[in-house]
Image (cartoon, rainbow, N blue to C red):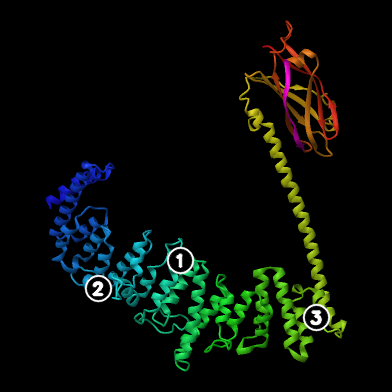
Amino acid sequence: AALVRFLEHVRPRVTDCATGGATGGKGDREASLVSGMVDTVMLASLVALDRRWDAVDLLKKPNRCHEASSLHLFAEKGVRYAEALLWLYRSGGAHERALRLLTPDKCVGNEGAWTLDQFHRETSDYLQSLWRSPNPVDNALVLQGGSPDGHGVDGPLLHLLRSAPNLGLKVFLPEPGGALPHPGSARQIVELLRRVSPVPEEGPAGRALELPLSAPLGLAVGFLELVVGACSEAEVHDELAEILLEGALEVASHAPHTADGGLGQVFTRKLRTFLQTSKHYDPAKMLAALPPQGLPLSPGAWQERALVLGRLGDHMGVLSIYLEERGGVPKGLAESYCDRIWVECGEGAGREAYEALAKVHLRVLGADKTASLLQLIESHFDRFDPSKVLELLPPSTPVAQVAPFLDKALRHLESKARLAQVKHGLLKVHFMNSSHRVTQQKVEELSNMAQVPVLAKLGKPKRSLPPVLLTEPAEGEGDEASGPSVRCVRHLFESGHVVAQFEVRNGLATGGMSGVLVRVVGSEEADSELYSVEAELELPYLPANSAGSCYVVLRSDDRNSQPPSGLITSTFSCDLFFDDHALPLQNLEIPTSS
């Protein structure tokens, strides 16, 4: 015990030294050797003290226990230390030897060994870890004929599938919310599951709607039903459809007049549910596989063919089966089918299905076909095209018989037209509001110099002069709405640039202003030589009763001309342009010296 406490104290430091080196030199090899000696001695001490769970915990974590030196420690302990021996192999990557050990006679027993249920759970978890491993060698060990040597001897997987089929199927399932591991191996797994006959389940009777895993093909069906929800591979879905069909036909051929007929009906029910819900199987392939006479041991033996024809979009074929009621097909399925197409596929495909329903009515219902068709179209007036219905009716049909349908159909079309107008108006308002918000956002962005790339390159202004009004001030309350007003803020930069920010307020109550721009021109020749216009940034649109900014960037060009003595400002004439208008503004003065 003292030795174990000492090793527990020094082991972390020794392990850090062994794992910290990355050069592969002599010192690293020696540290690894010392770490292995410490781990092996600690394992031997724990076994000698019969601290079995501590030994298992040591081997579950990364360790450097010497395998050959540790094997004889467990040989004398029997099945009580089978779990520790298993983890010794697993931690060293010796999975083949671990699988040879994983048998009930070597792992299950009394005096603290695994129970049979524990053995099955541990086997399932271990095989699942190998199946999910990124190493293809580990994956192959799971499927090598179900045995570790691949020579047909029952190995852990086959034993698990026979004795605890639910845990056996769990081996191949994905993690919660994860993708299916190795979907390309589904057919290989199914071929393995076909050869397994699990022990019949013990439990209460009355599970007629479920397929026991111990039933013929039960394991293969159970596996595929679990994976089709997580896999859209057509091959996997086709495999399940084929096996369900095979199961229904196989049970019927062997026991058509026994209690197994109930099992055949379970296969048939599962097949119908799958054909109706799955969108990934090949309907043409399935149609070719269905027997022409339908499935035996099943009421409504033509329903499977109808479901596959529906997946192919053959509405006429489906409705012919439903309306002729062959094989005991229940009434009402034809209209239910059309309703499902309307809901799942939209109005266009739905109208095609109902038009096919009308045609089949006329073909199969004999002398009373016209009256039956009129009753049908009147009860579903909102799903038939009136013009196409009139083409289907015999020319001798009295107008009075068609009038109730036409009246309902026209009222429905008028209602749809009014609804469309309301939707159009709402969408138009929504578009205008959205456009206004986008415009306002662009106006706000242009009013912030930091968000204008051309101006942001100039950096932060050295000084900004107070704003000056360039338009005549409003004299009365109503004058403000008579036209636009402009004021200018002059920003001076270290580079010699001057940015004139013209803040324009649209006082026009009638509408917005497009292409808003202020142009500046030097009043004197000297002014034009001192500053040149480098850029003009217009405001694309300014809504009514709002304000925005346009800019003129002036560059100081005093290399070509020196200002006269005492000149401290330059004067520029300004004009506001928008739409097709030009509005003269007051002159703008820009300082040329501080």
Please, what is the three-letter code of the amino acid marked with disc 3? Leu
Is the C terminus in the top left, top right, bottom left or bottom right quadrant? top right
The answer to whether one can see residue 207 in this image is yes
- What span is in magenta? 530-542
Tell whether position 107 is magenta.
no
Q: Earlier in the sequence, mark 1 or mark 2?
A: 2
Q: Earlier in the sequence, mark 2 or mark 3?
A: 2
The reply to whether callout 1 and callout 2 are in contact (CB within 8 Å) is no
Separation (CA) of disc 2 from disc 3:
74 Å
Q: Nearer the viewer, residue 480 or 585?
A: 585
On the image, numbered disc 3 is attached to which residue?
Answer: 392
Q: Nearer the viewer, residue 546 or 236?
A: 236
Q: Is residue 16 above or below residue 70?
A: above
On the image, numbered disc 2 is attached to which residue?
Answer: 104
Residue 112 screen position, x and y as percent:
20, 68
Q: Is residue 414 above or below residue 440?
A: below
For this view, does 297 lie left or right of residue 307? left
Q: Secondary structure at mark 1?
A: helix
Residue 556 screen position, x and y as percent:
69, 17
On the image, numbered disc 1 is attached to which residue?
Answer: 183
Residue at image coords 63%, 29%: 456
Residue at image coords 73%, 73%: 351
Please, what is the three-letter code of the amino acid marked with disc 1? Pro
